[in-house]
Amino acid sequence: MHVLYFHQHFSTRQGSAGTRSYEMAQALLRHGHSVTMVCGSYSKGNTGLTGAFQRGRRRGIVNGIDVIEFDLDYGNDMGFWRRVGVFTRFALGSVGVALRERADVVFATTTPLTAGIPGIFARWLRRKPFVFEVRDLWPELPRAMGIVRNPILLGLMSALEWASYRSAVRLVGLSPGIVDGIVRRGVPKTRIVMVPNGSDLDLFADAPQALRPEGVADNKLLAVFTGTHGPANGLDAVLDAAAELKARDRNDIRIALIGHGREKPHLQQRALEEGLENVLFLDPVPKTELAKLLAGADLGLQILKNVPAFYYGTSPNKFFDYIAAGLPVLNNYPGWLAGLIEENGCGFAVLPDDPRAFADALIAAADDREALAEMGHRARILAKTRFDREKLSAEWVGWVAEERRPETQRDSIQ
């Protein structure tokens, strides 16, 4: 079977973006299928292609995947309307690909929501089976965050969401809240499966050498956040906790924020003005290098802005990377991940907007390294038993190729 796969932000492990689509494409190959991946040029990603663009695109084989990359730069520091422009151009270019390229199944994954447009055209004009993967609920999340307030734009987004769900023969949701959100739009549960992000146990278990940022001694607790520094991440909460640590003279704790995003200059300026020398700002690194940094860390930070829509409606890559690396996790918002941490004893779940509780958790981690190590051990067990990417990808392939129904469906949507 040949899968025509649309993901605007596709990246191999050589990029600093999430690699779910790369790993899933590799799983398709292992199961005897072939893949054409259609993507754009993401600032955090690395598609594996190095040749020159010809007429706005380039094409080549990357580790067995036929990759078509549009010359469409995208970065998280872009303003709203620039993003909309890039999303629209990618969707329009992808429609042409969807109508011409060989495909037994057309698969598209968000974000953005416009990723569903080529699948809609392939379904109704070519009668190809369309499978749609939902990583975030749109327009629910931008509405909840106040990013999009225009009722006309929200209405158009809602219509596109409805059309994408109704055009898809099968859907994949990455979290319990996403599955529930799809059901609320009138899609039968029998057409939906939950396959969350997974833990790349091979990558994070075999990190060749643990690395720590320059100047961070081995005897200091190192807590790390990896990923986008954007409005949704709410990283001011980390600086609030750092200020609390400074006020308590806890100089034995360091926090490293690894990544880029629109909020990073503000965060750096705030840390400078408040003298928060316990916070380090690092550039994003390829996932292969990230494995070394996580191996040298003591605690992973799972941070989001306090928006109820996030509680059950996200499946963050970083959480699954942390537990794959055997890191305990400090989570600062309620929801399904907080529940996993509490149920499995693999970290700390604190309430949002409470810098004292956040600081208390960091201090508890620093003061009892033996208990922290045990939490890390349980985190690794959780990654192996429930979120092994290899096992989840096999179930995902079965669903996309309609070979069998994944076991996760019974657990996630009943």
Image: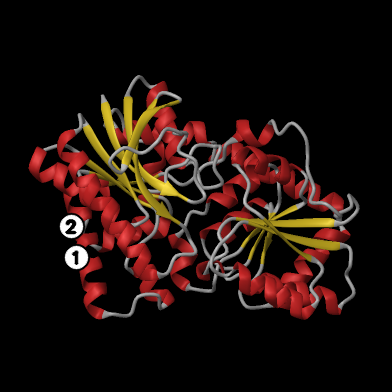
Residue 82, relative to residue 269: is it above or below? above
User: In the structure shown, which secondary structural element does the residue marked by tag 2 occupy?
Assistant: helix
User: As drawn, which residue projects farthest toward the top?
Assistant: 32
Category of crowding for the residue at label 1, using alpha-carbon neighbours closer than 10 angstroms: few (below 14), some (14–19), many (at least 20): few
In percent of the image, x 65 and y 54: which residue is there?
283
Inter-mark Cα distance, 2 to 1: 6 Å
Q: Contact (CB < 8 A) between labels 2 and 1?
A: yes
Which label sits on residue 403?
Answer: none
* Left or right for 207, reference 62: right
Asked whether the viewer can see residue 246, the reply is yes
In percent of the image, x 18 and y 43: which residue is there?
96
Quarter of the image for residue 274 reads bottom right
The foreground one among 13 and 159 is 13
The amino acid pointed to by label 1 is: Ala
Please give the residue where the numbered disc 2 appears in the rendered image.
163
User: In the structure shown, which secondary structural element does the residue marked by tag 1 occupy?
Assistant: helix
Please give the residue where the numbered disc 1 appears in the rendered image.
159
Residue 300, relative to residue 4: is it above or below? below
